[in-house]
């Protein structure tokens, strides 16, 4: 447990610093091979301070530890000091994410890791640690050699699947709700897996999902909306106040998906509250999304009192800093949340927001070959996460609009992933293009989960076997016995469930400009399944990419629902489609 700096202690420290001589600044520089070249030339070590602009304890460490005279003197004398915002460098963020922010890593001049520290380090302890590593610059216990991930099979072993299912149950807090016990947060993969199981009749999965979604509403800011990152102390009542784009995007998405399944107005209200915040604080004029809003109004000062104020009270004191970088990954995450809200409501506003974001990604971040940059100009990369997130939203927009240009974009993203992020002979996709031997990128679990789900669904839409093979590339990493059980185990179970089954398939046949066609397409999107294939077939545009069903030619637009090897009769109204799709779903789920 991290030790909290008392207000009295901070005031005493500030007073002492004010009366002392000015402390020289630490000469922070960017992460690069040049930093290590300088370390070799100057016979120094390298310290990496990897933090986040929204992170409370990063601010506290900056205000205390990195202004302590002894710490500063040691760093200036013996270290080349490097500081990186982890949101700007997904390769480093993915590599050291298990250490939390701030993460402190010390290397020798050749790039070998010596020690790795997690979280806030008080000045006295930091000085002692720096002194110790200078005296003995050999790898410590925290810098063990990386374990070699054994390649799994392209499908989850049945015994391992059973173990993962048991872990989902064991990791659920039946007293307080949510997966995990010390920190409470909206674990969207576990919720989505539970929704999948609930739709197949699993009552315990339904209870876990409903309970977690209900408890997680306590993390939604009652004034501005938006989802706080997590709560400490094993309950839902001690939030950390930072609001990150990913949490807003995934919160919108899973609350919208839950609303489609159960039609609980509280779930839709939660999704709308998150959207309300995102539009007010994280939406850029270009159509892209900003990255985060800081936890603190004043860097390093806990903001519980501030967030207890009403809107007017907060604004009188100021607004916490918003990170206005425009990253492809965050923009695509948010657009995917907007598509989910459109599916849940049929309200055109949400689709227009997603379309604006996707068009911005294509216009501002496109790379040759179908991939995407992270920022306007990247110091490294390209990074897997940006192209995977973009591919997912392109595929979602193809379902929402029937516009084949989005399917073409999704295919381009998949082709870029296959040609760029595979290391020959190794399982999975690496997080970035390796451009240095120092802290080189490796596969990251969450990104491979998203890649596998995207590539598998793209295979279902296109019938192109390349995408099945690329899905298996990710699965060989995810199914490895030393990767699959990591928290949350539901992530790999989601991939496994989708790879081993056909998605629900809903096709609207009719002229694109016909209002009846568009009404049926909105109804098809509202089919309550997280794993589905929705298409609009205007016969004038030629056959669909994967024409695996022969639909009859009718005089009026009609929708067909297919699942479990069976298709419904044509539906001419949204009400008919909902009824027939529900009967088909129940039939397909039956033993």
Image (tube, helix red, strand yellow):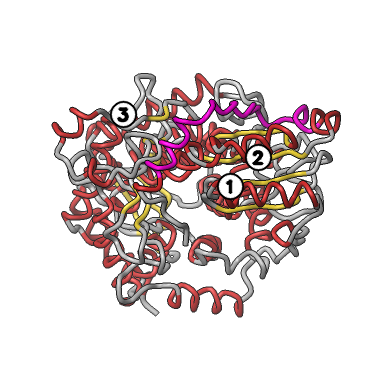
Does the CB distance between marks 2 and 1 fall below 8 Å? Answer: yes
- In the picture, the quarter occupied by the C terminus is bottom left
Which span is picked out in magenta?
10-36
Is 230 in front, or is 372?
A: 230
Which quadrant would residue 477 be assigned to in this image? Answer: bottom right
- Residue drawn at 65 percent across, 32 percent down: 382
Residue 550 visible, this angle: yes
Q: Is residue 15 magenta?
A: yes
Residue 537 visible, this angle: no
CA–CA distance in space, label 2 to label 1: 8 Å
- Residue drawn at 70 percent across, 66 percent down: 153
Which quadrant would residue 142 be assigned to in this image? Answer: bottom right
Q: Which residue is label 2 attached to?
A: 48
Q: Is residue 28 above or below residue 223?
A: above
Does the CB distance between marks 1 and 3 fall below 8 Å? Answer: no
Who comes first in sequence, dot 2 or dot 3? 2
| The furthest residue to the front | 19
Q: Which residue is label 1 attached to?
A: 103
Picture coordinates of residue 581 (x, y %)?
29, 59
Q: Which residue is label 3 attached to?
A: 352
> The residue tagged with tag 2: helix, strand or loop?
strand
Is residue 337 left or right of 165 when viewed as pictured?
A: left
Q: Residues within 10 Å of mark 3 (few under 14, many from 20)?
A: some
> The residue tagged with tag 1: helix, strand or loop?
strand
Picture coordinates of residue 241 (x, y %)?
33, 45
Picture coordinates of residue 8 (x, y %)?
35, 47
């Amino acid at each position: 447990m991290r030790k909290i700096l008392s207000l009295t202690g901070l005031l005493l420290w500030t007073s002492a610093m004010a009366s002392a001589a000015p402390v020289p600044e630490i000469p922070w520089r960017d992460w690069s091979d040049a930093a290590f070249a300088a370390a070799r030339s100057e016979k120094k070590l390298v310290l990496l301070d990897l933090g986040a602009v929204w992170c409370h304890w990063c601010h506290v460490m900056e205000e205390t530890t990195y202004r302590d005279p002894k710490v500063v003197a040691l760093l200036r004398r013996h270290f080349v000091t490097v500081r990186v915002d982890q949101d700007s460098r997904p390769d480093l963020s993915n590599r050291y994410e298990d250490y939390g922010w701030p993460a402190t890593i010390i290397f020798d001049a050749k790039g070998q890791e010596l020690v790795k520290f997690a979280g806030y380090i008080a000045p006295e302890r930091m000085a002692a640690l720096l002194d110790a590593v200078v005296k003995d610059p050999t790898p410590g216990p925290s810098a063990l050699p990386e374990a070699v991930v054994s390649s799994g099979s392209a499908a989850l072993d049945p015994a391992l699947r059973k173990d993962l299912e048991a872990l989902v149950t064991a990791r659920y807090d039946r007293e307080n709700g949510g997966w995990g016990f010390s920190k409470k947060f909206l674990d969207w993969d576990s919720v989505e897996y539970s929704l999948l199981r609930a739709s197949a009749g699993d009552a315990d999965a339904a209870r876990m999902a409903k309970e977690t979604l209900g408890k997680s509403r306590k993390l939604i800011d009652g004034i501005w909306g938006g989802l706080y990152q997590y709560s400490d102390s094993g309950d839902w009542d001690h939030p950390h106040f930072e609001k990150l784009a990913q949490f807003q995007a995934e919160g919108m998405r899973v609350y919208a998906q839950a609303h489609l399944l159960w039609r609980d107005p509280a779930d839709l209200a939660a999704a709308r509250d998150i959207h309300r915040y995102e539009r007010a604080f994280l939406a850029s004029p270009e159509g892209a999304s900003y990255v985060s809003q800081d936890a603190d109004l004043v860097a390093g000062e806990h903001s519980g009192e501030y967030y207890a104020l009403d809107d007017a009270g907060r604004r009188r004191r100021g607004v916490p800093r918003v990170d206005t970088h425009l990253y492809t990954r965050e923009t695509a995450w948010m657009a995917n949340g907007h598509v989910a809200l459109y599916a849940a409501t049929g309200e055109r506003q949400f689709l227009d927001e997603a379309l604006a974001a996707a068009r911005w990604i294509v216009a501002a971040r496109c790379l040759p070959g179908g991939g995407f940059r992270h920022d306007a100009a990247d110091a490294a990369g390209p990074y897997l996460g940006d192209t995977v997130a973009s591919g997912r939203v392109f595929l979602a927009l193809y379902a929402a609009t029937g516009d084949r240009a989005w399917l073409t974009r999704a295919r381009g993203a998949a082709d870029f992933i296959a040609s760029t992020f595979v290391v020959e002979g190794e399982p999975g996709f690496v997080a970035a293009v390796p451009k240095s031997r120092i802290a080189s990128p490796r596969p990251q679990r969450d990104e491979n989960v998203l890649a596998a789900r995207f590539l598998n669904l793209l295979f279902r839409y296109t019938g192109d076997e390349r995408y099945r093979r690329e899905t298996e590339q990710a699965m060989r990493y995810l199914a490895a016995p030393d990767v699959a059980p990591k928290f949350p185990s539901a992530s790999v179970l989601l991939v496994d469930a989708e790879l081993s089954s056909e998605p629900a398939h809903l096709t609207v046949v009719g002229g694109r400009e016909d209002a009846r066609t568009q009404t049926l397409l909105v109804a098809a999107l509202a089919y309550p399944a997280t794993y589905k294939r929705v298409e609009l077939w205007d016969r004038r545009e030629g056959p669909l990419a994967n024409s695996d069903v022969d639909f009859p030619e009718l005089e009026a637009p009609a929708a067909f629902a297919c699942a479990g090897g069976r298709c419904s009769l044509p539906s001419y109204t949204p009400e008919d489609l909902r009824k027939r799709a529900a009967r088909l779903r129940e039939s397909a789920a039956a033993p």
